Image (spheres, rainbow, N blue to C red):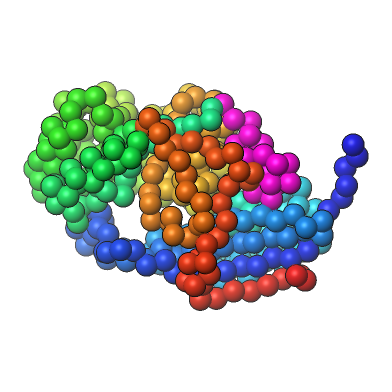
Amino acid sequence: MTYAPDTIRHIILSAATLPLAGPISDAKVFTGRQKPMTEVEMLFAEITTEQGFTGLGFSYSKRAGGPAQYAHAREVAELAIGEDPNDIAKLYDKLLWAGASVGRSGVATQALAAIDIALYDLKARRAGLPLAKLLGAHRDAVRTYNTSGGFLHASIEEIQHNASRSLEAGIGGIKIKVGLPDTREDLRRVTAVREHLGPDVPLMVDANQQWDRATALRMGRALEEFDLVWIEEPLDAYDVEGHARLTQALDTPIATGEMLASVAEHEKLILGRACDIIQPDAPRVGGITQFLRLSTLTHQAGLALAPHFAMEIHLHLAAAYPTEPWVEHFDWLDQLFEERLEIADGRMLVPERPGLGVTLSSRARELTHASAEFGRP
């Protein structure tokens, strides 16, 4: 069988605003740094080739930045028309350098992520394989934990109820938010949730970068008794030295990385031995091309992996990681896709459908407020 050359014929970029069921608050809201989250801005890329193969990718912003991602993608997407869709790394570099005057991280690479992910989805669909299988899966299901039920706007009773529902649905672990100005209230909430769950359910906490070094160390020591899977983002995401000190000082593993927007930023964490568990986000670091670079570095350093958000993408990437990872369960994006990911016995199952295994729903089309097309349909 000989290789049949193919080229990218058509690209559709879409911007959509997904309203959330209610305002969402983490520690950044209670410290006055951000307003409650009420929506998620989505950037979708749909790619079609001359041979009729298609791919879907997306990026997102949970607060400001969504319109900037869309605008940047519009400026560079046309450069992919006529290119071979198999040359994903080459295309990434081409689009990256086209917009390099505004940087090679952050919004610039988050805009490219939607296109990069769509190309991987297309490649796997053409092969008739789930993306995890195309990459080389180590497992067909990944441990999963729920985050969306544990935010700080919810009462302890609500969090307990949400946790029970998650466990009944087959989810394996529970993460709750901490980082309140009153650390005693944090401890009260963790105590109540641990007592509700019992000693055997995996429990994580997330301070969303709101502690200083002294508070993080003191809280880390106080939290040791709860047998946590990890303490997430105890410090500012860029405080490599502070995270390294905590990693050395505490028995509870330290997890961080979700807010970093490039492989280079994560590499500082890795080289600084500044965490036990790294939490990259493929849309934030520039897509799957960049995530795979980072995954190799992470595995070589002996770190555990727990990708942030976007489970529709990260399930496949986690399934291809050599050592047992975690994937984060959020139900926020469910209405954007026709399909649902299956969960059983504490694990999220890699779908047997080719590619990412998701297609855009009619609801996603309804929420679209801007779109641009390149090439010819």
- Say which residue appears at 48% left-offset and 36% top-offset: 349
Looking at the rendered image, the quarter that the C terminus falls into is: bottom right
Is residue 292 something one can see in this rendering?
A: no
Does the stretch in magenta take in 111?
Answer: no
Which segment did they paint magenta?
Answer: 120-138
Most foreground residue, 204 or 233: 204
Q: Among all residues in the image, which is located at the extreme right?
A: 2
> Would you say 357 lies left or right of 79 here?
left
Looking at the rendered image, the quarter that the N terminus falls into is: top right
Q: Among all residues in the image, which is located at the extreme bottom?
A: 369
Most foreground residue, 155 or 63: 155
- Residue 53 placement: quadrant: bottom right
Q: Residue 50's x, y, as percent?
A: 82, 60
Query: What is the total number of numbered labels drawn onto the structure image?
Result: 0
The correct choice, above or below, for 173 with respect to 44 in the image is: above
The correct choice, above or below, for 213 with respect to 182 in the image is: above
Q: Name the main secondary structure of what is drawn in magenta.
A: helix
Is residue 72 something one can see in this rendering?
A: yes
- Say which residue appears at 78% left-offset and 58% top-offset: 52
